[in-house]
Image (cartoon, rainbow, N blue to C red):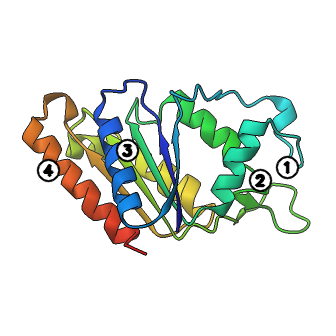
Amino acid sequence: MKISIILANPDPKSFNHAIAATVLAVLKQNGHTVCYHDLYQEKFDPLLLTAEIPKDASLPADIAQHCKELAATDGIVIVHPNWWGQPPAILKGWIDRIIRPGVAYEFLENDKGEGVPHGLLKAKAAIVFNTSNTETQREKNVFGDPLESIWKRCIFELCGVTNFHRKMFTIVVVSSEKQRKEWLQEVKKTVTTYFPAS
């Protein structure tokens, strides 16, 4: 299987990087082909400009490559911190520029964009690993867990990927080395469950 990993954290020493490295190692061990993107390391430009919005727009080479990979992928793993209940701006820009009409979704014939899009992604599953410094129950009860809605309903289900799993590791800022090792074991098990050895 072809699996895409998208990492969005500016600190190379972050636990997000440890998660992404673990995901990469497990996928390779399981015999999958991996497209790995560290958006900060690649200096991904998150700005969606007007000329790029139309479905048939001429895209910059790097954006066209991301789109091609996304359309061809059998699975997607996203890794990022929870910043104000949202993905980091660089990842939001990736969504804006790559999760685009004709690649991830389309509107049905005679629909001018006012209807419900039809998902185009062929990915069999998507996993999102988040880190946070907010306690889980507070995230749900006070904030309504916005990342769950963003990734599950607003993005992946809309684009045709209904086999979705999200795990938020918290509270990272006070976590011990032992706790982080246990979390990485959970990452390994989750990735193997959704993308077993081929």
Dot placed on the residue nearer the N-terminal end, 2 or 3: 3
Which residue is label 1 attached to? Answer: 55
Which residue is label 2 attached to? Answer: 101
Dot placed on the residue nearer the N-terminal end, 1 or 2: 1
Dot placed on the residue nearer the N-terminal end, 3 or 4: 3
Tell me the quarter of the picture where residue 178 sits: top left
Residue 195's tag is: none
Which residue is label 3 attached to? Answer: 20
Q: Is residue 126 above or below residue 35?
A: below
Dot 1 surroundings within 10 Å: few (below 14), some, or many (20 or more)?
few
Secondary structure beneath label 1 = loop
Left or right position of 90 against 63: left
| Real-space Cα separation, disc 3 to disc 1, in angstroms | 31 Å
Q: Is residue 198 above or below residue 41?
A: below
| Real-space Cα separation, disc 2 to disc 3, in angstroms | 28 Å
| Real-space Cα separation, disc 1 to disc 2, in angstroms | 5 Å
Tell me the quarter of the picture where residue 194 sits: bottom left
